[in-house]
Amino acid sequence: MATPQFKQLRRSYGFDEVAIVPGDVTVNPDQTNIDFKIEGFTLSIPVIASAMDAVTDVNFAILMSKLGGLAVLNLEGLQTRYDNPQEILSEIAQAPDAEITPLLQKVYSQPIKENLIGERIQAIKKSGAVCAVSVAPTNTKRFAPIVAEAQADILVVQSTVTSARHISKSYRGLIFSELRKSIPMPILVGNCVSYNACLELMRTGISGVLVGVGPGAACTTREVLGVGVPQITATMDCAAAREEYRRESGRYVPIITDGGFRKGGDLCKALAAGADAVMIGSILAQAKEAPGLGYHWGMSHPHPALPRGTRIKVGTTSPLQQILFGPTSVTDGSQNLIGAVRTAMGICGVLTIQEMHKVEMMVAPAITTEGKSWQLSSH
């Protein structure tokens, strides 16, 4: 007799469990077009640097923009709490492991200085770079007018999980369709992992959706809260929502897979699963120009009661240009990310990222271990 079921579980997949199938035709990698468009902006590479204090400061944002990508400055981090964030960053890098959580709680308890928001934005804009900034939903109404006045280019509204309908006792939550009317710039919203949440967010008129809950190297949401969906499945579900929204509205809203990337192959798989671009933290925190000085920590780490991010030592490997464009000096796939994307597209015979969305993928749990006994035993 069959046991009655309380719930049906769906199988879901992360980067290491799937593989991209080569195409029947190949194309020259240097002929591929990997542009990423957000409304009026076109980036020449589909890579966005995370809004994390160890990754993006003013200088990193300027450099990332020069290299064709985008970096998001966290307006609720050290850059807007301190006139001299470099001193705090070096204190964090030097703290022993046992003291790191109380130290982060202390340095992030300083109030945000509204004048620094405008100053940081203007410093990025003055260099001619595209300026993207990030705020949490709770502070969006307060900071959005300052962001607009300082003439930032793109606003990212980001929290661990964001939905279009938030249930709260407070009088009225953040309503994206109203925010959209009140400030004249593209708005990216994240993070979500499900078809319905993604579709509802797109229907509010926003410009892009960040996909991913808990896969980041410095994020512990999955361990502490038990919440998350592996990135390939999350990306495919949100890509399905994007296609449904395009059918019903005629508008194409890009999705950006955020978190969990360790090597070039992961970027290629995210794009094949339906992402239009990727958001990366820990790999870029290894850049010589990154403000974290070889360390990286989660945005939820300083929570006063439930810290759930962790400081990790990522080390400093090479300049940002080398991480993105090579030449690579390592064999683990953590450098020349753009070369990897173009080569994979060439092998699949596709010329654009939208064509990459159509390539065949398969479930392949042995993709990283098959025949690799010599590599695996040497680690």
Image: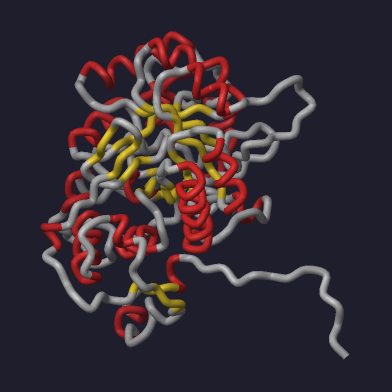
Task: Give the side of residue 122 with respect to residue 222, left or right.
Answer: left
Residue at 52% from the left image edge and 40% from the top image edge: 202
Task: Give the side of residue 113 with respect to residue 318, left or right.
Answer: right
**Camera-nearest residue between 245 and 108:** 245
Residue at 19% from the left image edge and 66% from the top image edge: 346
Residue 197: x and y in percent read 61, 46
Residue 125: x and y in percent read 26, 19
Q: Quadrant of residue 303?
A: top right
Task: Give the side of residue 245 with respect to residue 59, left or right.
Answer: right
**Camera-nearest residue between 289 and 365:** 365
Residue at 31% from the left image edge and 62% from the top image edge: 356
314 versus 157 height, above or below? below
Residue at 46% from the left image edge and 53% from the top image edge: 243
197 versus 350 height, above or below? above
Q: How is the image coloured?
A: secondary structure
Residue 348: x and y in percent read 25, 70
4 versus 35 height, above or below? below
**Camera-nearest residue between 332 and 168:** 168
Residue 224: x and y in percent read 66, 51
Does the image show residue 217? no
Does the image show residue 80? yes
Farthest residue, direction bottom = 1
Task: Give the side of residue 90 with respect to residue 109, left or right.
Answer: left
Q: Quadrant of residue 160?
A: top right
Q: Quadrant of residue 375?
A: bottom left
Q: How many marks?
A: 0
Q: Where does the N terminus fall, quadrant-wise?
A: bottom right
Q: Where does the C terminus fall, quadrant-wise?
A: bottom left
